[in-house]
Amino acid sequence: MRLLKLRDDMLLVRHGSKRVVLDKIWTTKDLKYSLAERKALSIKMIFEKMPLYIGENELIVGSRTVYGATAETGSKPSCYDYNAMPSYVNQEDINYFGFNHEFVSKAHYTPDYSIVMSMGIDGLLEELNEKNQAYTTKDQVEFGQSVQIVYQGLKSLILRYADEANKLSREEEGQRHIELIEIASICYHIASKPPETLREACQLFWFLYLGTIIENFQFINFGRMDQILINYVKEENDNELTEIIGCLLLKMYDQYDLILADKNLMGHYSAQHNVTIGGVKRDGRDGCNRITKAILSALSYTNLPEPLISIRVSKKSPDWLMGKASNLSVKGLNCMAYYNDEKVIDSLNIAGINIEDARDYGFGLCQDILIPGRGDHYCSGGTNLTKILLKAIESTKMKNISYSNFLDYYQEKIIEDIDEKLKAYNRWENAILEYTKGNRQCYFDNLKEGMLLADEPSLGLSDAQAAKSEKEDVHVELYIQSLMSPLPFTSALYHGCVESGTDITRLGCINKDKGFMILSPVIAINSLAALKKVVFYDKRYTLEEVLKGLKANWDGYELMRQYMWNAPKWCNDDDFVDDDAIAIIAMASNKINTFKTPSGGNHLAGVHQPHPVFAGRHLPATPEGRFAGKPIPVTLSPENGTLKYGPAAAMRSVSKIDSRRIQWNSCLMLQYYSSTFGENGGSAKFTQMLRAFFKMGGIQHQPNVVDIEELKVAQIQPENYKDIIIRMWGVSAHFVDLPKDVQDEFIARFDVL
């Protein structure tokens, strides 16, 4: 079968033979164009020059083949720097801004590919010709011209693939000859016109994604793929749909083998893009369709960690949605996540997002909720509950303080932190707005006064971006928006940017909301419960004594640590812990929701903690008994070794949180033994459990279904267990590809208190 052959080709990285290192002579920085146009010309240069690849079994074509060199590129064919683009920033630009953000992109975008698909590339270019006549400012004209340049470049790339397929067809006979002729015909058509068939739609969809990933380097998502592609289904039967969609899904894994130089995440590049399926449509009707079903059918053949599949489960969803999805989950396809459609829509609508947009939500990289092509919710910063708690313990000067007073003091510090960081973000956004209006001096005055930072737009992104390199001195990429790094290709895939002549990095998209992270919640919750029990109620130790234990990393304080570790913990349906957790999250969320963005949106609250191993490395010892540097739990999931009463208790704890105040993220990730669901009726059991969680008020669930003993053997014999997929946080990977400390953390999730 074609999909199985394509899967083998992908895992063997046959397309890797066409990868090249970016030629150092490629540059646009000395051309007499604006910064935005030079950026566009550098992307166009890649489109026009990068090597082409068409695999022998492919129906959907196009691969990113130009990368940067690393010290190991010569000896390791997968070791490339994916941040590769011809230089477009010159010394005059650097002098003007006072820093160099040439290759910066926060990524984490989820465009609306249907914008260009509906009008075709020529339609977009014609619209831009008209807009350029109507734009009134120099910045608008330069923006319009930059978008024209990149999409003329995309047109060139597609025509190159059409010619290549034609050339290859002359070397083939029989069925493959016919297929290559059809690939060429499709590419010739979509290089100018809107797609008319599903094959044409999938091919243009992929080329548009390829453009965004070349421009942003990483972390671009696919949005509601089933809602976009259903418009092109004609008379295809189910098998044909599964094959076409499967070909597209397999293309989404073509960079999995790339090795990061500093291994700061998972050892491999792992694009971790997200596909959203199911849920209701913008008009409120059920959105499940034949493409939704084809995606789930194709996944049983592709069986890979990516793309991540986010499943919106509505009360209107047909039974087959959960039936097919649950069957994949219980079989170990641990790239699936599930969302309570009504709860998410309600929370977005309450936050001020109009109901049509709220119904159209999708996901970013780490399951961050946003509106594809309309909202860029990532990211106005984050407040780290654990770090604030540690500071509160150290800074309180009150002797014999009561728990109630300490809790009030802690909450005051959280409020102060949120206030400081959101005001800092708003100063940055206001400066960007003034810059866009032509008041450049306001922007530079803010830089000089320290209200803006050269390395990040808000105080809080250092906490929000929790993944750090293994070595403190290793350069960490900046996931920010920068005036020095416009995104003309991506901007055209967002409603509002072309209409207003404003790049997305200048807040051009129509939805002005931003997300704000409530970080490391569970360590803070468990630590607070331990202090409440051991210090304030049982009075075994004082805060001063606990502080000494923390600073010593519990060395010489093991008895104290044991008391703290054995105190009540989150995710056990214990109101002693849960009541304070609910109150703190509600308080923080309400504070976040009171802030408006200067451009007219809202700050959305998200409870989120990614990167459990890497975020833990930079966190000192904590009062619940954790040692310094040890991993921390994912978002609202139980801390490793503390789940006493199973998944049902964890779901009850999480369901107590008021979903109406959480608009951005609130994941509960749980691990299940493969035997939990059995051989027969396992998917029905999973479905019943998930529906019960949603009925209680749960918002989102990310499951892992694995054989824990198999994982332990896989660490010793990785060559025999290459297909095991696990989800670490909002991202998934093959277990054997992960660094050992990440593997060990995952196995430790099965420990019990």
Image (cartoon, rainbow, N blue to C red):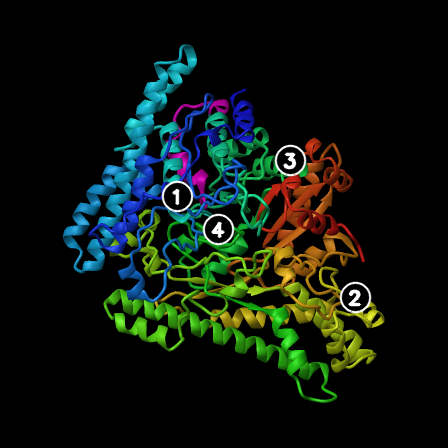
Q: Nearer the viewer, mark 4 or mark 1?
A: 1
Q: Quadrant of the N terminus?
A: top right
Q: Is residue 698 visible?
A: no
Residue type, label 1: Ile
Sequence-wise, which precedes: disc 3 or disc 2? 3
Give the CA separation, mark 2 to mark 4.
35 Å
Q: Residues within 10 Å of mark 2 (few under 14, many from 20)?
A: many
Q: Is residue 259 positioned above or below 564 on the image?
A: above
Residue position marked by numbered label 3 in the rendering: 327
Q: Would you say residue 230 sits in the magenta stretch?
A: yes
Label 2 sits on a secondary structure element that is helix
Sequence-wise, which precedes: disc 4 or disc 1? 1
Count numbered badges in the picture.
4
Residue position marked by numbered label 2 in the rendering: 565
- Start and end of the magenta stretch? 221-240
**x 78%, y 78%: residue:** 535
Left or right: 214 in relation to 245:
left
Left or right: 530 in relation to 339:
right
Q: Is residue 683 visible?
A: yes
Residue position marked by numbered label 4 in the rendering: 364
Give the CA separation, mark 2 to mark 1.
47 Å
Residue farthest along the top direction in this orientation: 174
Residue position marked by numbered label 1 in the rendering: 214
Q: Quadrant of residue 398?
A: bottom right
Residue type, label 3: Asn
Give the CA separation, mark 1 to mark 3.
35 Å
Query: Where residue 401 appears, x then y in whole percent?
Result: 72, 86
